[in-house]
Every structure is written in C-alpha cells, then in structure tokens.
Image (cartoon, rainbow, N blue to C red):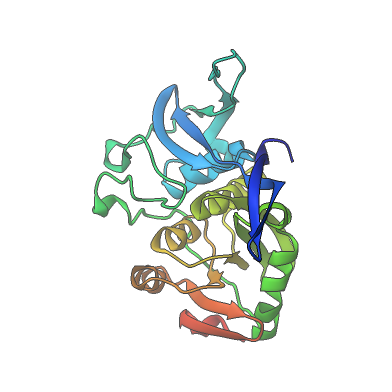
Amino acid sequence: MGRVTVRRKVLRLRGGVGTVRQDNLAAEEPLEIRVGGSPLSVTMRTPGADVELAHGFLLSEGIIGGREDVSIARYCDGVDDQGRNTYNVLDIALADGVPPPSPDIARNFYTTSSCGICGKAALDAVRTKTRHQPTGGRIDPAVLAELPDLLRAAQKVFDATGGLHAAGLFSSAGELLVVREDVGRHNAVDKVLGWAMLSDRVPLSDTILLVSGRASFELVQKAAMGGIPVLAAVSAPSSLAVELAAEQDITLIGFLRADTCNVYTGEHRLT
C-alpha cells in the first residue's frame, strides 16, 4: 500500500508471553496546502488522494465552488534530508477571476488529524455559506440499514491497520459511489468531496454521506458545502452538529447500526 501504511516492529503480549512481530501502522504525514504559492493550511493526513483532499478542503472552505475554479494542482519541492521529494506540499492555482482566500477564513498554519476547524481564526468564520443548497435525498430506512456493512467491506486500509476513519458516498438508492480513508475524519470527507468535484458531481444532490465515527460540526459543514442532503454516522452527533444540520436542512442520522438509528434532523426525507 505504499506510503499509506508503515511496517514497524512491536512486542505483542498475550497471556503474559511476549513475541516480537511486524505490525502495519496507518501512515500520518503533514500536507501543506498552498493557494497561488501562499501557504493556507497544514493538515496531518494519510498520504494518497492529495489532489482530491485539496479540492475538497477548498470547497468546504468556500474558496472554490466547482472544478472550473482550479486551473492546476501540483506538488512543490518539499524534500527530506536525503533530497527526495516528500510530496507533502501541494500548490493550487486558481482559475482566472477566482478571488484568493479571504483573510476572514484564514487558519493557523497547523491543524491536527483529529480536528478540521480547530485552527479557525474566528468562530464566526466556521459557518461558511454554501453555494450548493442540499436538495433531494429521499431515503428508504431499509437502504440505510445496508450502508454500514457496505462501507466496512470497502475499508481496505483499516483491515490492514485498524487505525483509519472512512467516509463513503452513496446514491439515495444505496449504490456505493466512492470510499476514502484517512487518519483524520475531516480529511476522509474532504477526499470524498474532492473526488466528487473532479468527477463533475457537485452539487451532490440525492446522495448519502456515511462516516465511520461520530458526526461533528465540521462534517455537517462539509456536507452542506458539497450539497449533500443526508449525513449518517455510526456513532453520535454533537449538539452543534445537530444545530447546523437543522439550519442547513440536512438529514442527520446517528448510531446507524444494522436496522437501528437515531434521526436527529430532516426526518421528512424518510420514505
């Protein structure tokens, strides 16, 4: 799996007996995202699908609204101590006429893999205005019940490491469109959004976004920015996530496991 996983020697204890073995770890490396040569953010991510990640990140920040807003994405010369390109610096050139990022949404230079908004300069900048109002998304509860197993079956890197979040995009009929994994839950969603943008699928009407962990505020925000009408999670939502989902008319579902779930907002979409 290349840079997605790393092999490390570990001491495994079982029944008081220790054995040395090789273990697979999920890779975590920094990605610096630049816009027009100027640093915008650094996020800790699992390498892979970096161009998707950058496009999804810029979409969720309201900097771009579609594929046509980007002219080129390219890696810069970030090198290690042996002079090898690390592929950890990605520069996005915006298309002519697309304004550069506003200082109002500026981030601190570093965000962790566990938090997608903790670097925000101001809380007021968090409620980014979407260009793609979520629409459609009528769903059958029987379809919902099948999604966790479909997502879990597609988590190939999780099978090898046990240490990654996943985000899966489904049609309203339950067809799996794409799955992305990452050490950061927000990165996994950004990769899904970036895939959709590069595939000319934004806005994502009549889709369901399923995440493998909890539903936090920033994930609801990202769903809104992509025009996704239904966000489901296998764990709990936060209070602010529920508040924003109601505000954006997003159907928010938590504790989706087999044939049980909690519907916190947007129950009008259930058939």
Residue most extreme to the top = 83
Residue at 41 percent of width and 68 percent of height: 248
Q: How many marks?
A: 0
Can residue 181 be seen from the camera position used here?
yes
In percent of width and height, residue 39 lies at 40, 27
Query: Closest to the observer: 268 or 111?
Result: 111
Left or right of 264, for residue 269: right
Residue at 61 percent of width and 78 percent of height: 138
In percent of width and height, residue 60 lies at 46, 49
Residue 181 to residue 35: above or below: below
Can residue 174 be seen from the camera position used here?
no
Location of residue 243 by image quarter: bottom left
Left or right of 23, for residue 52: left
Point out the image quarter for the C terminus: bottom right
In percent of width and height, residue 147 lies at 68, 73
Point out the image quarter for the N terminus: top right
Residue at 49 percent of width and 67 percent of height: 214
Location of residue 55 by image quarter: top right
In percent of width and height, residue 10 lies at 64, 46
Query: Closest to the observer: 245 or 70?
Result: 245
Residue at 55 percent of width and 18 percent of height: 79
Left or right of 25, for residue 32: left
